[in-house]
Image (cartoon, rainbow, N blue to C red):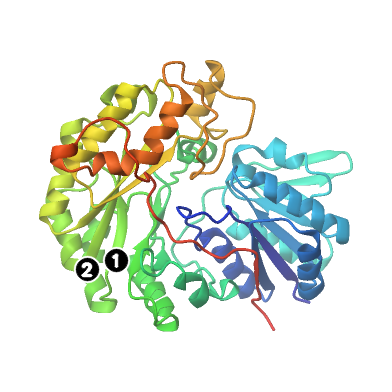
């Protein structure tokens, strides 16, 4: 008998600059479960209300609950799990980034049946299949299981091969409605690859690389499969007039990129955006992207101080290369978005001014600026902890306007002033340019998404 699986997706609180989009991980897991005859559904919310949790459980009647969580949303995830277990004695499994980087903290939640470290497409299907048969499989790679005598901690297997995977499910998201909220900026969302070979100190990708060693964690999907998914989704969502690719570095594989740029106009023909990295795209490839229909490219600047980039962030990229990249993207007719991050360890008012100045020189069409958040498992979190730079509270989400990093040379009120006024300082007219804090709003305006909505993927 097929099992009902309820996915619980904790969301960031809705704020003007917060973007909350489609969750590819849940989509892939749901697709795998459907292929095995199971019945997934989704509960996405930014708050924990007991009456709402009870209503969802009464309506969906799940046999299994799967909760995903980042570090920022973990307090909400814990509250939701505790509420679920107050009403129903269900097998609850936890996955996502936080379960991967902080499994012991996740394992401390009373009553959960298990957790998944790393990717879980094949493993979670095995778990659900075994529950359907009445005996939980306890040897699933990457999974930890609670037993009376303690936890069974299985090592990770290899990363999930991407070729041939069922397309990530969007039905449980009521995707046409979900994506409509962000159609003007984001559009239909896809991923052509997973992972990143670089080791930026603020990112979780190096941890995944270490956990999966000696296997490579950067993988790409066949172009034909990616385009088939795009075509299928757009056919079901005619209101979406643009496409977005969330790959960390869309331009990493040159042969793959050339194949994509040749086929995309013929099979899709919609405007699209993507992410790249300085040093991972040439002027020729920028021209290929534009010819294929690309309209916007996102590039991380992070900080305008070369020493901080190299010694603190492990991004040894000179200013000249950043300037050159934005220049040839602009010449190719591509709009640009620059990612920036304030408040990294050893940040000063002078280094922030350098970041403002570098953004003035590269002249991006859009700016995105956030405060640095030290997430557990990253090299920069360890540095902050070793040097006693952490305040005794949890980091906020990517859009939080409060820091837990103590920079002795940078008062918090000064940091927050630059954060709030970053955009106005960068885009000040030539005659008014100064490094004095202005009155503008420094955060990229991102569309809000309604949370607290139950989506049903079965009748």
Position of residue 426 measured from the top left corner of the image (x, y, whole percent): 25, 40
Looking at the rendered structure, which numbered label has been put on residue 19? none
Position of residue 178 measured from the top left corner of the image (x, y, whole percent): 51, 71
| Residue 397: quadrant of the picture | top right
Position of residue 241 measured from the top left corner of the image (x, y, whole percent): 33, 75
Sequence-wise first label, 2 or 1: 1
| Residue 319: quadrant of the picture | top left
Left or right: 66 in relation to 284: right
Q: Residue at x 69, y 73 (%)?
A: 38
**Residue at mark 2:** 293
Labels 2 and 1 touching (C-beta < 8 A):
yes
Looking at the rendered structure, which numbered label has been put on residue 272? 1
* SS for dot 2: loop
Q: Label 2 vs label 1: CA separation?
A: 6 Å
Position of residue 69 measured from the top left corner of the image (x, y, whole percent): 62, 50
Quadrant of image for the N terminus: bottom right
Q: Is residue 180 above or below residue 249?
A: below
């Amino acid at each position: 008998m097929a099992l009902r699986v309820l996915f619980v997706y904790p969301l960031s609180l809705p704020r003007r600059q917060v973007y909350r989009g489609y969750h590819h991980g849940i989509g892939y897991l749901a697709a795998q479960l459907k292929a095995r005859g199971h019945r997934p559904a989704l509960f996405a919310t930014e708050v924990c209300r007991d009456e709402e949790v009870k209503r969802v459980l009464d309506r969906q009647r799940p046999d299994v609950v799967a909760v995903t969580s980042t570090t920022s949303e973990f307090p909400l995830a814990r509250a939701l799990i505790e509420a679920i277990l107050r009403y129903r004695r269900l097998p609850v499994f936890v996955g996502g980034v936080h379960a991967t980087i902080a499994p012991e903290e996740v394992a401390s939640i009373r009553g959960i049946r298990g957790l998944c470290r790393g990717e879980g497409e094949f493993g979670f299907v095995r778990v659900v299949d075994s529950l359907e048969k009445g005996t939980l499989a306890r040897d699933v790679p990457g999974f930890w299981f609670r037993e009376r005598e303690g936890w069974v901690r299985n090592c990770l297997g290899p990363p999930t091969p991407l070729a041939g995977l069922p397309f990530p499910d969007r039905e449980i998201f009521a995707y046409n409605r979900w994506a409509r909220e962000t159609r003007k900026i984001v559009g239909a969302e896809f991923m052509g690859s997973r992972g990143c070979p670089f080791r930026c100190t603020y990112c979780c990708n190096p941890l995944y690389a270490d956990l999966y060693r000696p296997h490579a964690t950067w993988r790409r999907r066949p172009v034909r499969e990616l385009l088939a998914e795009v075509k299928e989704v757009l056919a079901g969502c005619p209101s979406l007039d643009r496409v977005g690719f969330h790959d960390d570095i869309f331009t990493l594989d040159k042969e793959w990129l050339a194949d994509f740029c040749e086929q995309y106009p013929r099979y899709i023909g919609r405007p699209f955006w993507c992410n790249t990295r300085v040093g991972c795209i040439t002027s020729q490839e920028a021209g290929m992207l534009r010819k294929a229909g690309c309209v916007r490219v996102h590039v991380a600047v992070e900080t305008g101080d070369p020493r901080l980039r190299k010694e603190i962030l492990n991004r040894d990229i000179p200013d000249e290369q950043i300037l050159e990249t934005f220049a040839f993207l602009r010449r190719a007719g591509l709009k640009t978005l620059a990612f920036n991050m304030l408040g990294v360890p050893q940040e000063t008012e002078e280094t922030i001014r350098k970041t403002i100045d570098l953004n003035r020189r590269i002249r991006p069409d859009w700016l995105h600026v956030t405060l640095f958040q030290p997430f557990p498992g990253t090299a920069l979190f360890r540095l902050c902890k070793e040097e006693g730079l952490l305040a005794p509270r949890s980091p906020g989400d990517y859009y939080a306007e409060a820091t837990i990093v103590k920079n002795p040379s940078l008062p918090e009120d000064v940091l927050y002033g630059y954060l709030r006024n970053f955009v106005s300082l960068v885009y000040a007219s030539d005659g008014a340019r100064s490094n004095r804090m202005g009155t503008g709003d420094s955060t990229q305006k991102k569309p809000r998404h309604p949370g607290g909505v139950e989506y049903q993927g079965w009748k």
